[in-house]
Amino acid sequence: MPEPSARPLAEHHYPCESCGADLRFAPGQERLVCDYCGHIQDIPRATGRGASGLRELPLEAVLRADLPELEMEEHRTLSCPNCGALVEFEGAEHAAECPFCATPVVVDTGTKRLIKPQGLVPFSLTEEEARASLGRWLGRLWFAPSGLAQYARRGRKLSGIYAPFWTFDAASRTEYTGQRGDYYYETRQVRVQTNGRWETRQEQVRHVRWSHAAGRVARVFDDVLIYAARSLPPSYIDALRPWDLSGLTGYRPDYLAGFSAEGYTVELHEGHHLARAEMMHVIQSDVRRDIGGDEQRITRLDPAFSAETFKHILLPVWTAAYKYRGRSYRFVVNAQTGKVQGDRPWSAWKIAFAVALVAIVVGVAVYLDRTGG
């Protein structure tokens, strides 16, 4: 996508009406809160037609780089040298720590042109609630260092960050050819040896009768969700699912007050390719159901997609990056549901103790067996 001419970088500040300090968004509420004087301000509600702001953008036009200027934003960003996160910064901030891996980073003066988010899911969990979820998750891990869970509960700061996602909509019609397999059984006699004696038995042998199959299936896809960054492994993202996208609201910078946002590093065309792959898995399942029978073979799929649209959205995540006894551990909490995923810590002494305990139990069992006890 070609770079449009640069515009002045927008900075968003929300001064308290009472004392002038910067406000922050209060998770679980539609309000901005001042940490200095406690003053509360409601987030202004948009009114009129299209007030939700959740517009679906035409995919084909954007892939041709035909996107209106109003749908683009400029951000000051820096790519973390460790995990590759594209962290966005505002105002006069010049130094920070990567919220995903705790690597110190220094903000350069460069800017990046990005597609503006159409919507976001606001934070529902407070930092204290997210920390409690993390503590419970760590406490359930076998062979995890007990000190790490205590370290995580000691008021260590979590970072609230909005993670970037693409959602894709499409209508599809797919013609297919294949084969339907139906089971049938034949009875045959076999000779088997039982207690040193041979005898004849009957057994059922399964066969498959294959027949030609062809047809067409249709499927409408709504909000196929693709993570638009690379800072978190796919296994982490999968573990944080599902997201309740009914909680999406139109994008307003107010919701980012007090939080960070990660810029997307998976470009739209790549996200579309990943979404198409997910759609094809669903279509294959539809085709197998349509063929029916006990087994199916698909020899040809000819999908046609239409009415393709997309949105760029932000989803809320609490992140924690801890260094414990010389090792770094990274954890993420779904700030909508409280689901947790992270690096699996192991305690060497707990594992050694368990191995020794098993050895003792086996040794006692062998001793009792030999002595007739």
Image (spheres, rainbow, N blue to C red):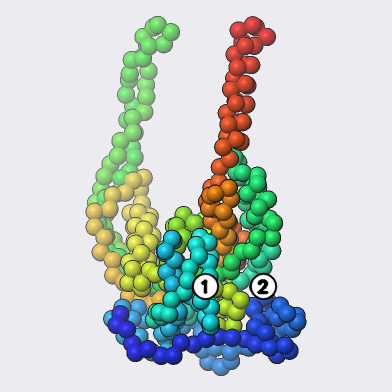
- At which x and y percent is residue 138? 62, 49
Which residue is depicted at the point 58% across and 89% down?
46
Q: Quadrant of residue 369?
A: top right
Q: Are marks 1 and 2 in contact (CB under 8 Å)?
A: no
Q: Secondary structure at mark 2?
A: loop
Q: Is residue 326 left or right of residue 291?
A: right
Q: Is residue 109 left or right of residue 258?
A: left
**Which is more foreground, mark 1 or mark 2?**
1
Give the Cα separation between the discs numbered 1 and 2.
29 Å
Q: Secondary structure at mark 1?
A: strand
Q: Quadrant of residue 278?
A: bottom left
Which residue is depicted at the point 51% across and 76% down?
94
Residue 307 seen from this side: no
Circle 2 is placed at which residue position?
28
Circle 1 is placed at which residue position?
95
Viewer-side residue, 212 vs 138: 138
Image height of 13 relative to 181, above or below: below
Image height of 288 relative to 119, above or below: above
What kind of residue is marked 2? Gly
Picture quarter with the C terminus = top right
What kind of residue is marked 1? Ala
Picture quarter with the N terminus = bottom left
Residue 168 seen from this side: yes
